[in-house]
Amino acid sequence: MAMMLRQTTANIVLAAASVLIGLLLVEAALRLIYPVAIMNIEAERARPAGEELIVADDSLGLRPALKTSMYDGDGVLFGRSISAKTSNPYKILFIGDSVTGRGRIVAALAEALGSERTAFLNGGVDGYNIQQEVEFFLRYQAGTNPDAIVHQLHINDLQPTTLVVRGRDGRVRSYSPRMKPASVNAWLYRHSQIYRFYILQFRSRFSQDELRAAAYDALRKMRDYARERKIAYHVFLFPNLAPYEEWSAHDKASRDYLLRISGELGLGTVDLWPLAERLIRLGVDAQDSPGDTWHPNRRFAEEAARYLIARIPALTPPAPKD
């Protein structure tokens, strides 16, 4: 009997160890081939007492609260925008995700071009994909009446968008467009790639085909909106800041798809990948922090600004009329 008990215990321990090793291998594999990052700050956000900086939205999932210490009433990050010195400026609105929102490229463009006659309005929203950026623009930012719109796409835009935030009640929830908020285990989300993969892939319920179709439709809407109002509309694509051979198959396919539909829509998208690849080959550190392949540091932003100025004429205001 004792022998049977020991054998059963040994089998249970062996099975548990096998499951644990299997989970660790899956965890390691996902970190290598599908590097899902933490998509938003699930810890408490620094904010003035009594101020809510983000609010739930039935369509967008989450959106910035307007008329706060961060976003003005038109959905512009006024603390990361650069005002013109003239009273009737040439206004460039930058829309995109956190690459735009963090303001490095916007600031580098303003420094290179000057703000004597140009206002650089930062309309970036952390974690947004293309269709969210366009919906947020049409709903709120169109009121800025820009002379030019520069839309920053990202090769991660064709992943399901799920934002994870801790609310005032202390509970952590995930928010996806057109879905009700769902509770999230904050510890697992912070430490487990498997759990993050589950949240990203299975909580949003959007297929890859749906995400691609939504991106195409959103870019078409922006193109048509700008054409009807004679607003200069330019698009650039932000890459993975790692050597191309280290990109996942999904990243490569996303870049190819976004460039293809941009061509079909006649957008003339500026691809920053050749610039990133050249700098990486030269040994230049382009990442905002070690391991962050999604966001640029100041050096890359300055190089990107020069690259964009050479390819987007609308970044330079027209000569003043006599």
Image (cartoon, grey):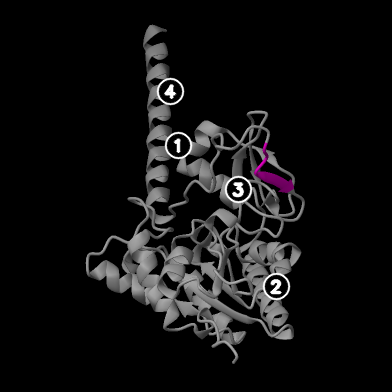
Q: Amino acid at mark 3?
A: Leu
Q: Which mark is residue 145?
A: 2
Whether residue 254 is visible here, answered yes or no, is yes
Q: Indicate which label's residue lies in the foreground, 3 or 2.
A: 2
Q: Which residue is mark 1?
A: 191
As drawn, 47 above or below 89: above
| Pick the front one: 92 or 12 | 92
Q: Which residue is mark 3?
A: 163
The residue sitting at 42% across, 12% down in the picture is 5
Give the Cα distance between marks 1 and 2.
43 Å
Chain-order first, disc 1 or disc 2? 2
Q: Which residues are magenta?
A: 51-56
Label 4 close to label 2 by CB (< 8 Å): no
Q: Position of residue 75 (x, y in %)?
A: 67, 58
| Pick the front one: 61 or 193 | 61
Label 1 close to label 2 by CB (< 8 Å): no
Q: Position of residue 193 (x, y in %)?
A: 46, 43
Quadrant location, the C terminus: bottom right
Mark 1 surroundings: few (<14), some (14-19) or many (≥20) residues within 10 A: few
Q: Indicate which label's residue lies in the foreground, 3 or 1.
A: 3
- Furthest-left residue in this view: 282
